[in-house]
């Protein structure tokens, strides 16, 4: 018999899972970023486990290692060397569209959600660790996102509508 709450027990399972894993992909989706979709250094996280056939016949497979919400990441502070954050970036997309199936959808509370997700990513990142945050500006500009997270990246790269932002966690002086 254990006196621990259910969420404490989940955290304990996650801590065991995190042992020896250096990288957390918070919104892994179908793992398109990854050369090795079974990389043993990575914990793949997403809010859903999902499969479907898209309108062009492609199979969509979202099978994370853990199902969790980026607004409440179930890992201890200072756990990972690298965190990857690629949240949904569309608000106006239809619920049954292929874009929504593949990339998810923001809700009306997106500023609070993205801020919470960014802060959670930084919390689970080790000191001197790196966060890679991808943002596509099809509907929401980069300026709005930087205003929301109230932090600037150390470097960024832009390709069409897509920004890759790199943040570095340093000690607060
Ligand atoms: C832009 S897609 C990520 C695509 C991914 N990088 C890839 O390479 O396939 C965003 C993902 O975030 C997930 N997501 C949406 N809300 C979330 C939340 N609150 N917590 C964790 N994942 C979430 C969606 O299910 C979706 O798979």
Image (spheres, rainbow, N blue to C red):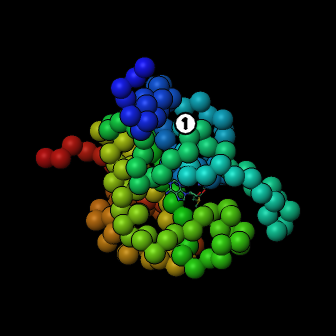
Tell me what residue is drawn at x 49 percent, y 38 percent: 23
Tell which of 15 and 80 is nearer to you.
15
Ligand 1 within 8 Å of disc 1? The answer is: no
Tell me what residue is drawn at x 36 percent, y 50 percent: 120
Residue 11 showing in the rendered view: no
Tell which of 150 and 91 is nearer to you.
91
Q: Which residue is mark 1?
A: 42
What crowding class fits label 1: few (fewer than 14 Cα within 10 Å), some (14-19), or many (20 or more)? many
**Residue 43 rendering spot, x and y as whole percentages:** 54, 37
Tell me what residue is drawn at x 49 percent, y 41 percent: 24
Q: Is residue 112 above or below residue 154?
A: below
Tell which of 145 and 166 is nearer to you.
145
| Residue situated furthest top in the rendering | 1
**From the image, which quarter does the N terminus lie in?**
top left
Tell me what residue is drawn at x 31 percent, y 72 percent: 147
Residue 21 showing in the rendered view: yes
**Residue 66 rendering spot, x and y as whole percentages:** 56, 40
| Residue situated furthest right in the rendering | 57
| Residue situated furthest left in the rendering | 173
Tell which of 152 and 140 is nearer to you.
140
Q: Is residue 54 above or below residue 71?
A: below
Tell how many labels.
1
**Residue 118 rendering spot, x and y as whole percentages:** 38, 56
Q: Secondary structure at mark 1?
A: strand
User: Would residue 91 appear left or right of 100 to someone viewing this image?
Assistant: left
User: Would residue 127 appear left or right of 106 to someone viewing this image?
Assistant: left
């Amino acid at each position: 018999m254990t006196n621990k709450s259910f969420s404490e027990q989940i955290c304990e399972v996650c801590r065991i899972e995190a042992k020896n894993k250096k990288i957390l992909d918070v919104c892994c989706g179908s793992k398109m970023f990854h050369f090795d979709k079974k990389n043993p250094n990575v914990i793949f996280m997403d809010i859903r486990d999902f499969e479907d056939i898209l309108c062009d016949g492609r199979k969509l497979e979202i099978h994370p290692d853990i199902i969790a919400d980026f607004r409440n990441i179930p890992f201890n502070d200072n756990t990972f060397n690298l965190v990857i954050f690629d949240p949904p970036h569309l608000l106006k997309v239809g619920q049954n569209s292929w874009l929504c199936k593949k990339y998810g959808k923001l809700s009306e509370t997106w500023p609070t959600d993205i801020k919470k997700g960014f802060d959670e990513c930084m919390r689970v990142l080790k000191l001197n660790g790196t966060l890679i945050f991808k943002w596509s500006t099809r509907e929401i500009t980069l300026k709005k996102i930087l205003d929301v997270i109230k932090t600037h990246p150390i470097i960024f790269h832009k390709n069409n509508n897509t920004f890759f932002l790199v943040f570095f966690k340093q000690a607060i002086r």
